[in-house]
Amino acid sequence: MADPIGLGARSAAQRLATPNNLDLPTDVEAALHARETTTRPDQYLDPISLGALIVSVASLAWTVYSDLRKQTPRPHHDVITRHVRIRLGQAEMSQPALSSADRDRYIDITIEETLNAAQGPVSGQN
């Protein structure tokens, strides 16, 4: 299987890139590279940029998905999202300056794209 974290993060960056933030795909590539070269791959990146936030969420979504698959072959999208949000709320990570609505949008799109990469398209999602 291809790397769902990388695929999900790249897809989310493409969807979230705006004329005011054309560097987002490059930021994601840099964060993915940093993730690959770290000595502790289970350590979440300190999201000092939107790219790092996306990669962190994609990594967490993949971890949650993998854990839940031990209980059910195809965990429901809403359950995965709830688990990711709970874990993000518990993690002490600095966040880029985003409104709550924008942060939620980045998280939702990143989770959706990561799950698309892991299990195929999620129906009924934006």
Image (cartoon, rainbow, N blue to C red):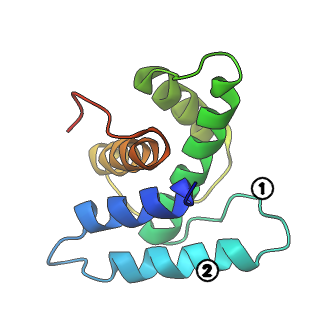
Query: Which label sits on residue 42?
Result: 1
Residue placed furthest toward the top? 71
- Which residue does the image show at 52% across and 52% down from the upper left? 58
- Which residue does the image show at 24% across and 61% down from the upper left? 15
User: In the displayed structure, does residue 8 sit left or right of residue 102?
Assistant: right
Secondary element at image label 2: helix
Q: Position of residue 34 (x, y in %)?
A: 66, 78
The one nearer the camera, 85 or 10, is: 10
Secondary element at image label 1: loop
Residue placed furthest toward the left? 19
Q: CA distance from mark 1 to mark 2?
A: 14 Å
User: Mark 2 highlights which residue?
Assistant: 33
**Eyeballing the image, is 123 above or below 1?**
above
Q: Position of residue 44 (x, y in %)?
A: 69, 58
Could you tell me the amino acid type at mark 2?
A: His
Query: Which quarter of the rendering shows the C terminus?
Result: top left
- Which residue does the image show at 29% across and 50% down from the upper left? 102
